[in-house]
Image (cartoon, rainbow, N blue to C red):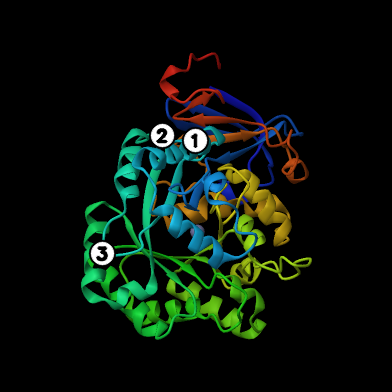
Amino acid sequence: MKLEALHIPRVLRGFESAAAEVFDVRIEGAHVADIVASPVQRARGMLISAPVDAHVHIDKAFSVREVGAANGDLFTAIDRTARHRAQWRAEDIEQRMERAVREAWQCGTRAMRTHLDWPDAEPPVALQCFERVRERWHGRVTLQFVALTPLDVFADARAARRIAAAVRQAGGVLGAFVYRNEGIVHKLGHVLDLAQEFGLALDFHVDEGLDADATGLRAIAQLALARGLARPITCGHACSLSVQDAVQARDTLRLCAEAGIALVALPTTNLYLQGAWDETPLPRGITRIREAAVAGLRACLATDNVQDAFYPYGSHDLLQVFGLGVQMAHLAPATDWFDAITVSPARALELDWSGHIAPGCPADLVRLAAADEHDLLHAGGLQRTVIRDGRPLRQDEQQVEQYEETAT
Ligand SMILES: [Zn+2]
């Protein structure tokens, strides 16, 4: 199969391209065989590696009609969801998860990391649902989970060890919701120690608010530098960086870069939950993506909540989220930031393939109708062909193996 006259964004090129901007790509079997400069000067579309979504919540996706939207208040959303969670039935959770993963798959996503609400020592019902969904989608969408536990629960040493043991057994990532907790450094230190002891990666919801004194991210970076953990640490949200003193925020990002922390910005949910609701919201809660890049830390953009109390709109199409992030954080030219939904999350999730397109790489690609950045936020430009294992996927199909090949 040959893909002709496509622009490949520079940040995704894992090959020497000199001055060329338009390429012909030959696919053999499930891999890219070669990439050459195209004789055509004008690109007819764009080729990116299949996106990786570093942060979603498929246990509660699509629950907004039952739970109700929280109209811009994070803690209202948390309370409502906690009450609603008590009635969750396994079949409903599994159906929501299945819908979310199918949607992501059809949009081209190759890997996804979901948080699962894990409010106490006991593993949640959602874990078993997730394990079944992970098994069903094996080989199509790589699924990872993070236990999302309030940080204060880790103050109970027995509960903390039970959670870590269950997460390890199920092949997951340890996580916590961190926001201006009392004794935050001590509690975080305990979580980092647990991760080290159990050989787990970490993924935090951290500083998701507009209080300048929310400094969990800085504490995590300092602890990580002091301990030198074997597995990676991912930090999502970091909204408070946006309202902190610029010098302090830059210094925190320098520490994060030094500690190898992955930073995940979540534009949809932050736009919805941050800022006033009784008047026009002015501060918007996006973290300092550009300052992070200057510090050498290339952030991820991820989907977060979809149609639940935390964000009542949206879908699991990471390219839509990317478009919003581009506008919200002035990520221009947009094509220079495609690593935010491919290479950077692939590293955070410790995936085998970096997401750079090069001869020999997996032919898990997305061909976009947009030929340049200006069409990337256009519905027509976002029309795409998803290529998985070297074969184009029809938007209506769920199984690659059902595809009847017509491509040359
Ligand atoms: Zn989240």
Residue at 59 percent across and 42 percent down: it is: 315
Instruction: Residue 396: give x, y in percent of width and height.
Output: 55, 23
Q: Is residue 79 left or right of residue 87?
A: right
Quadrant where the C terminus sits is top right
Q: Looking at the image, which is closer to me, 169 or 160?
A: 160
Q: Please give the name of the residue rendered at 33% of the width and 75% of the height, measured from the top-left corner.
A: 228
The amino acid pointed to by label 3 is Ala
Q: Is 92 located above or below residue 114 in the figure?
A: above
Mark sitting on residue 105: 1
Residue 338, x across and y down, in percent: 61, 50
Marks 3, 1: nearer the viewer: 3
Q: Nearer the viewer, residue 32 or 197?
A: 197
Residue closest to the eye, 176 or 255: 176
The kind of secondary structure element at disc 1 is: helix
Q: Are marks 2 and 1 in contact (CB under 8 Å)?
A: yes
104 up-or-down from 154: above or below: above
Whether the residue carrying mark 1 lies under 8 Å from ligand 1 is answered with no
For marks 2 and 3, give the CA distance: 28 Å
Residue at which label 2 appears: 140
> Percent from the top left, x then y, of residue 82?
44, 59
